[in-house]
Amino acid sequence: MSCPTAFEIAKLLVSLVTVGSLIYAIKAYNANVRKQQEDRVRDADKELVTQARLSLEWAYDALTAEGAQIPPKADRLNWLTCARHLLRHAELAGQITSQTYRTVHAEHEEFWRHRFYLALDDIALRMGTYYLSGPGALSAENIEPRSAAVVVAFSAWPAGLKDLTDSVDVGKTLHGREGGAVRGVRHYLEALDTAKAQRRG
């Protein structure tokens, strides 16, 4: 058995370095491809959030004449346009994939849901006659029922949506806080406790 020559050892080392370099290059390439894909998803999500927010704003503006008509006028076209923007918003929101951008979008949606709720919180909208703009129940001038359903459904709290305030510990939240409003809330909490104790008897 002969000893490997220096030349053979050098060839072996070069082969090992070449294989190592190839493995490193493949890993670097794969990491680069993954990063490019993540960047594309992030950029797409950013655009989706921006447009979804705009769709909510446009829906509100279409319904309320940019906030000037609250409660909104019983106008078929305004309700249809609003509903279309809300449906487009839902379509866009459904395409957002990253958790960060879904959270950002949820904030925008909650802001606009509240604005819609306030705009629609009028006694007139609780009456079927509000939606009957035309001369009869089947008039083409009436508010289109599907658009009415889309708009009022958006303004309501979605079933199954977790309310973040449900997990708030009031005592911990107010601990170490002082001031007029904090004092008022503490008095309110004491009144609630007293009323609950009286009810229990």
Image: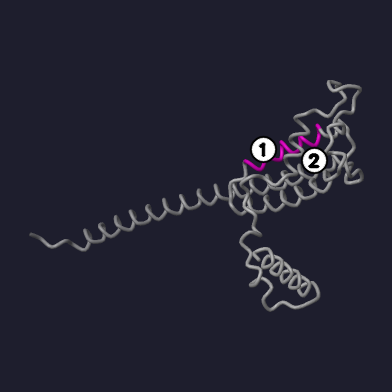
Find residue 103 and report its horizontal and vertical position in percent.
Answer: 64, 53
10 Å neighbourhood of mark 1: few (<14), some, or many (≥20)? few
Q: What residue type is labelled 2?
A: Ala
Mark 1 or mark 2, earlier in chain: 2
Residue in the picture at 33% in, 58% down:
17
Q: What colour scheme governs how the chains and residues are painted in the rendered image of this protein?
A: one colour
Which residue carries the number 1 mark?
A: 91
Residue 20 sits inside the magenta stretch: no
* Element at label 2: helix
10 Å neighbourhood of mark 2: few (<14), some, or many (≥20)? many
In the displayed structure image, the side of residue 69 where residue 30 appears, left or right: left
Find residue 105 and report its horizontal and vertical position in percent.
Answer: 68, 50
* Element at label 1: helix
Find residue 77 and report its horizontal and vertical position in percent.
Answer: 85, 30
Q: Nearer the viewer, residue 56 or 168?
A: 168
Which residue carries the number 2 mark?
A: 59
Q: What stretch is highlighted in magenta?
A: 80-94
Q: Quadrant of the C terminus?
A: bottom right
